[in-house]
């Protein structure tokens, strides 16, 4: 880990050009790499040497961005994936075979919920969902003998719940399993889950990390802190026959988990990021710290404005003093949480639609965490198949508007909100 501050890491970590080399991270658009001897390549295949041999398993452009994100989160290694979805899948599958069980917070992204509740259940992995506000006793009761990890979002999408991750980490460790955290919304600029005890972090890099809405991607980061030698993780502590009996914890030490994710699951599933996407992601990362600062100050201004408006029924933003997550947010992310504000307008579903259609600067899109202000009404779009009661259960009331505040001038964003509210 470098000694620099997070905003300097955003720019410099992962790639240090040598004399006469390109100043900007190059796009290595090559599937393969040449070697002078078959023996050398054989050693790479046997994991005896490190080096690039095929882009599904590693690529210099991806490698630099992986090193940057690992450094930003404070981990020992990272692996880019083709999407946030594949990062969620691989982060769990790496240590949870069929027949195992996962304790997950119920306040998670809808796509993650479907992945867990449908596809991974069909693969033979069981899930128990607990409230992100569960007490320690309630969390403890969710564990089973075959539980192999706990999963939670640091700031949930779209419900904006800030989970007490230190408590989730303690509970996980008391049961001998790691805590995996989806840290997409705050990004490592605002919050680093490893500092409160999380063991693995994953992201949808599609959101703030990229920030320009130009690539879909994901990443998994390993803290290197979890001790896998407790008998629950034979896939890491016993010989892997598909690599001539390598034992990951013996050969790779603290990087056992992330090395296995690559050499086993990326080898077999092929959900790797494209070099061009890694390059675009890196451009986004270079300005991430600056953008997060502006996203957060703009979002707080919007949340404060909405809170005092007579047509607004309720506002949820973790940075508002009125938020029930305010104290935890101040403790975990004193510099800000994210740029997303959710709120409801008096008049419910119809008023929400009139408000959204009245916006001029903000556009209606199925996306969040973009530098352009954008808005989504889950009840009439992403969640339109649900009735009002089902919507509430999913944490998205019929009147909920998810407002993703961009980095435009705050006066222009507020003026747009004001004129749209006047039309409701
Ligand atoms: C978008 C999102 C995902 C899924 O990521 P994709 O890049 O769309 O596959 C996972 N978690 C959170 C919190 C998200 O916002």
Image (spheres, helix red, strand yellow):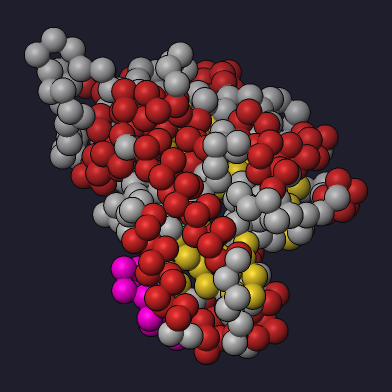
User: Picture coordinates of residue 225 (x, y %)?
Assistant: 63, 24
The mark total stands at 0
Q: Observer-nearest residue: 375 or 312?
A: 312
Q: Observer-nearest residue: 233 or 314?
A: 314
Tell me which residue sits at (53%, 62%) in the image. Answer: 305
User: Picture coordinates of residue 259 (x, y %)?
Assistant: 47, 30
Residue 285, above or below 255: below
Tell me which residue sits at (34%, 47%) in the image. Answer: 210
Magenta segment, which residues? 353-364
User: Picture coordinates of residue 126 (x, y %)?
Assistant: 70, 59
**Viewer can see residue 333:** yes
**Viewer can see residue 398:** no
User: Picture coordinates of residue 13 (x, y %)?
Assistant: 35, 23
Examine the image and state in which quarter residue 343 appears.
bottom right
Residue 80, above or below 222: below
Q: Is residue 139 left or right of residue 234?
A: right
Residue 398, above or below 237: below
Tell me which residue sits at (32%, 37%) in the image. Answer: 287
Question: In the orientation shown, which residue stands out farthest toward the top?
Answer: 19
Tell me which residue sits at (73%, 43%) in the image. Answer: 327
Residue 362 shown in magenta: yes
Examine the image and state in which quarter residue 357 appears.
bottom left
Residue 319 shown in magenta: no
Q: Observer-nearest residue: 80 or 239?
A: 80
Examine the image and state in which quarter residue 113 appears.
bottom right
Q: Is residue 365 left or right of residue 276?
A: right
Question: In the orientation shown, which residue stands out farthest toward the left?
Answer: 20
């Amino acid at each position: 880990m470098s000694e620099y501050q997070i905003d300097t890491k955003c720019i410099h970590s992962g790639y240090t050009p040598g004399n006469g080399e390109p100043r900007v991270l190059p796009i290595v658009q090559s599937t393969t790499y040449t070697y002078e001897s078959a023996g050398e390549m054989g050693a790479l295949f046997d994991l005896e040497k490190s080096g690039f041999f095929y882009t599904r398993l590693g690529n210099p452009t991806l490698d630099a961005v992986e090193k940057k994100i690992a450094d930003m989160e404070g981990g020992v290694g990272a692996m880019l994936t083709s999407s946030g979805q594949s990062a969620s899948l691989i982060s769990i599958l790496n240590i949870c075979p069929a027949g195992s069980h996962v304790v997950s917070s119920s306040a998670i992204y809808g796509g993650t919920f479907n992945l867990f509740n449908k596809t991974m259940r069909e693969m033979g992995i069981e899930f128990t969902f607990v409230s992100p506000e569960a007490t320690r006793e309630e969390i403890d009761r969710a564990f089973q003998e075959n539980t192999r990890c706990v999963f939670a979002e640091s700031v949930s999408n779209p419900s904006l719940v800030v989970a007490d991750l230190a408590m989730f980490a303690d509970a996980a460790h008391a049961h001998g399993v790691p805590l995996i955290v989806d840290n997409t919304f705050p990004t490592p600029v605002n919050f680093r889950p490893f500092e409160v005890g999380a063991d693995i972090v994953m992201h949808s890099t599609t959101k703030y990390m990229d920030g320009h809405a130009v690539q879909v991607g994901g990443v998994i980061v390993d803290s290197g802190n979890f001790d896998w030698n407790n008998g629950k993780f034979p896939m890491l502590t016993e010989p892997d026959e598909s690599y001539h009996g390598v034992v990951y914890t013996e050969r790779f030490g603290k990087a056992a988990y992330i090395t296995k994710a690559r050499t086993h699951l990326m080898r077999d599933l092929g959900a790797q990021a494209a070099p061009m996407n890694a390059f675009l992601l890196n451009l986004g990362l270079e300005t991430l710290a600056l953008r997060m600062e502006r996203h957060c100050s703009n979002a707080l201004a919007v949340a404060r404005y909405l809170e005092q408006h007579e047509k607004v029924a309720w506002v949820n933003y973790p940075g508002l003093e009125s938020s029930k997550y305010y104290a935890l947010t101040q403790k975990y992310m004193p510099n800000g949480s994210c740029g997303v504000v959710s709120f409801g307008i008096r008049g419910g579903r119809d008023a929400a639609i009139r408000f959204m259609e009245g916006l001029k600067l903000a556009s209606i899109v199925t996306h969040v965490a973009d530098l352009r202000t954008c808005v989504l009404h889950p009840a009439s779009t992403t969640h339109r198949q649900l009735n009002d009661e089902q919507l509430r259960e999913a944490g998205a009331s019929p009147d909920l508007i998810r407002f993703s505040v961009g980095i435009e001038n705050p006066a222009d964003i507020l003026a747009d909100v004001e004129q749209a509210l006047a039309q409701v």
